[in-house]
Image (cartoon, helix red, strand yellow):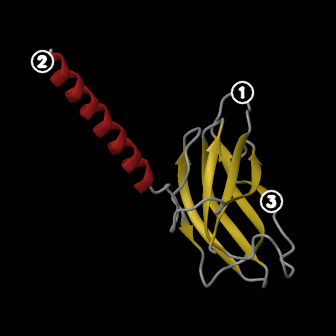
């Protein structure tokens, strides 16, 4: 009887320690993100569609950057490829004050891969439009879809 009691208490202690370690690991887990983790900081800015023609250009019109705009406080961008392999040459960001920032990527992106978070020059910015230059490397004339995300600073 004492042996069964010891086994039951050992099993109970093991279950309790497992539950404690799982709840502790979940409470200390920080969601991945740039540069400060937290919900609601990643913002979808738009999608460009590129053909297989060399140096194809597509524009994403994001915002008019008036006072009170929802994305006036962007500090970084990320480029994600979907569906078809794509070779991106450059991405040009035009901000609300008329200035531009060119990101010379010259990278090949496989399907469902993305770039790292790329810092924007200056303080918090509002992106008015994005020009994406590149070409799809797919078969049968498929087009590549390139999504652009922004990271908001609060």
What is the quadrant of residue 96 in the picture?
A: bottom right
What residue do we see at 49% from left, 55% from top? Answer: 32
State whether residue 122 appears in this view: yes
Query: Label 3, on which residue?
Result: 59
Q: Quadrant of the N terminus?
A: top left
Mark 3 or 2, which is nearer the eye?
2
Image spot of residue 39 (x, y percent): 61, 59
Q: Quadrant of residue 17?
A: top left
Label 2 crowd bin: few (<14), some (14–19), many (20+), radius 10 Å:
few
Q: Which residue is at 67% across, 58% downward?
A: 149
Q: Earlier in the sequence, mark 3 or mark 2?
A: 2
Q: Is residue 154 left or right of residue 109?
A: right
The quarter of the picture where the C terminus appears is: bottom right
Q: Determine which residue is flagged by label 2.
A: 3
* Residue 110, percent from left and from top: 55, 40
* Within-10-Å neighbours for mark 1: few <14, some 14–19, many 20+: few
Q: Residue furthest top?
A: 1
Q: Which mark is residue 140?
A: 1
Which of the two labelled residues, at mark 1 and mark 3, occupies the earlier sequence position? 3
The residue under the point 65% across, 76% down is 101
Q: CA distance from mark 3 to mark 2?
A: 74 Å
């Amino acid at each position: 009887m004492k042996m069964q009691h010891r086994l039951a208490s050992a099993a109970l202690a093991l279950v309790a320690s497992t539950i404690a370690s799982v709840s502790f690991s979940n409470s200390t887990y920080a969601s991945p993100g740039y540069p400060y983790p937290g919900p609601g900081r990643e913002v979808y800015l738009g999608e460009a569609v590129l053909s297989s023609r060399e140096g194809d250009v597509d524009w994403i019109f994001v915002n008019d950057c008036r006072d009170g705009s929802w994305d006036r406080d962007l500090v970084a961008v990320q480029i994600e490829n979907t569906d078809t392999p794509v070779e991106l040459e450059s991405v040009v960001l035009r901000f609300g004050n008329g200035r531009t920032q060119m990101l010379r990527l010259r990278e090949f992106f496989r399907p469902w891969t993305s770039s790292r978070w790329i810092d924007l020059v200056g303080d918090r910015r509002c992106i008015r439009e994005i020009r994406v230059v590149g070409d799809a490397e797919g078969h049968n004339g498929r087009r590549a879809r390139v999504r652009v995300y922004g990271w908001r600073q609060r």
